[in-house]
Image: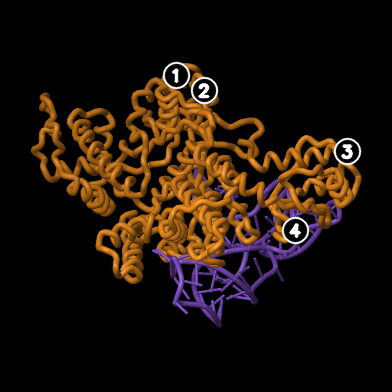
Amino acid sequence: MELLNRKLKQIILKAFCDAGYMEEDINIGDCAIPKFGDFSCQSPLFLAKKYHKAPFVIASDVLLHLQKNEIIVNASVANPGYINFFIDNNYLAEYLKKYLEYVKNPLISKNKKVLIDYGGANCAKPLHVGHLRSADIGEAIKRICVYMGDDCVGDAHLGDWGLQMGMVIYAVWEKNPELVYFDDNYAGEYPKEPPFTIDELKVMYPSISKRAKQDAGLYEKVKSITHDLQSGRRGYIALWKHIVDVSKKLIKADYDKLNIHFDLYLGESDSKKYQDEVIDYVIRNGYSRISDGATIVDVSMPDDKTEIPPFMLLNSAGSALYSTTELATIVQREREFNVDQILYVVDNRQELHFIQAFRCVKKINILKKDVDLKFIGFGTMNGTDGKPYKTRDGNAMQLKELMDMVKNKALEKVKETKANYSQDEIENISDVVAISALKFADLSVFRSKDLVFDVDKFCSFEGKTGPYILYTITRANSILSKVPNIEGNFTLSDEDRKLALCLIKFTDSIQSAYEKFAPSYLCDYAYSLANEFNAFYGKSSIIHEENIDKQYSKLLLTNYTKDMLKKCMDLLAINTLEKM
RNA sequence: GGGUUUGUAGCUCAGUUGGAUAGAGCAGUGCCCUUCUAAGGCAAAGGUCGGGGAUUCGAAUUCCUCCAAGCCCA
């Protein structure tokens, strides 16, 4: 299907050429002043210098050469040189029907394999608010990329190899030191069942972590356990596997609640098998050098404005580091998944680390093909003091705590307004409303900007919020359910065309969201569409409309709006409601 | 100290390769539920786009400089 924007460009470009302005491309945008037009062309302003003519003169020339067509009506020139025009109502109505079909199934062919790294949860640790952005943004980006034709794989990339594992192993030992996992002489098979329950695991890390902060001896013990684990001590590895298995279930359940679904739950440890090979490869091929005992790879480039510090492969103790794991993971992803592109949806603060890793990968030429490595940074969740958000005890707020707060607020609201609903309905509605509020608030700020963490904002259900979009969908639904199927001619009245024009702008917003890896563009779009629909809703009653064609047309628009809003919310990974 | 990001209404944020009157939400003001769900709509109010300079027909947007804050690396 040929999109309206392309068609408009063709027609107007032809007028430019016919008028003697031989251009390859021109610009078509929204008209800033609605009474002047639906769209406007600003190109005469840009071309004034090139042709040594006043923009107004160019615009007038072009207007004279604009051929009669079925799309553009009432074209005019405005100071200092805009060409403004409207779209014919009949054409718009026909176009809209086809457009909605096209949007449902855009028929874009698969173009590349993309792996998206957007988890970063740590095994045995509860999710905190910082994990929310990565998950929300990453899941939305994944869905947007899939819609635009990419073959996507989402990886949770769990932290499963750090100090927290040592803490949990310590906790198990403290409770049951007699277990075979701690017996160096034990040579048999280890038990298939974990020696702890899910609920026990939940409290192990927080309790040991808290104690280790005050107890240096305990901290040292934990470090030594972690070291033994990473060195491959048999019993610890067996126990570690149990911890990872149970943790994955916990983490998956948490992400499920947020409507976030990973295709892979790989962890840092999974790339370990490539690590020695990569280290060996780098050293053997002479890419590294020794500096202060550490093995480093220089990644600065001659035309760098600022010095990029070297990539560290091994520290002075000869151990692999976080950066080494990153390298091994990239190799793993290329070999095992044959990716063309990897998107890292991570906190802005990690940018330097990734620049170093990406440069190192290119420099050592270890990949078989040119994989596009992209850092998709997002801003920090800050407190009202402008610093990264911390609770009173100095830790990041747990996600569960935040979710409970929003849920309770939603429950209050639903109970207050929907007294006649059943208990199940109230529960379900509150859940969906709460999650939509949380996710929409998170997603609607452009990703790279820091976000002020404001509980009241997350708990707000009015204005530019998730619940407002849900509410709009239920309003549309309510109308559709009350009118029997009718047939008529689809015509657009002047008061309804604003909604129609808004509907066809979906393509622009998803295009921006895709190009900039920024779901906030879709949030803006969904909000403006909902806004337009609510204005349309308020102007006149659809159910009581007596003219059949008018009623049919309004119903069609209502249906289109509902479909489009649901599509947007689906792309943002936010569940919607039929009734609330 | 070096680098980097940000500064737009009281608060939280939009603002396309420079372009028409800088836009939303929240808070506050005034209307609108005997009519499709008021979690809504309509209207008004709110601004020295951090300060100063430069570039030009035209700057929130580009450049310089200063101020303030966050982050990263030492």
- State the separation of the CA atoms marked 3 and 2: 53 Å
Q: Which chain is orange?
A: A
Question: Between disc 2 and disc 4, whose residue precedes?
Answer: 4
Q: Residue furthest left?
A: A178
**CB atoms of marks 1 and 2 within 8 Å:** yes
Q: Do the residues at pointers 3 and 2 share their chain?
A: yes
Left/right placement of residue B42 relative to residue A147 reads: right
Query: Which residue bears the numbered disc 4?
Result: A36
- State the separation of the CA atoms marked 1 and 2: 9 Å
The tint chain B carries is purple
Q: Nearer the viewer, mark 1 or mark 4?
A: 4
Q: Secondary structure at mark 2?
A: helix
Question: Between disc 1 and disc 2, whose residue precedes?
Answer: 1
**Which mark, by number, is residue A364?**
2
**To which chain does the residue with label 2 belong?**
A
Q: Amino acid at mark 2?
A: Ile
**To which chain does the residue with label 1 belong?**
A
Q: Nearer the viewer, mark 2 or mark 4?
A: 4
- State the separation of the CA atoms marked 2 and 4: 58 Å
Query: Which residue bears the numbered disc 3?
Result: A20
Question: Between disc 1 and disc 3, whose residue precedes?
Answer: 3
Q: Do the residues at pointers 3 and 4 share their chain?
A: yes
- Quadrant in the rendering for residue B44: bottom right
Query: Which residue bears the numbered disc 1?
Result: A281
Q: Do the residues at pointers 1 and 2 share their chain?
A: yes
**To which chain does the residue with label 3 belong?**
A
Q: Amino acid at mark 3?
A: Gly
Does A197 appear above or below A578?
above
Q: Residue furthest right?
A: A52
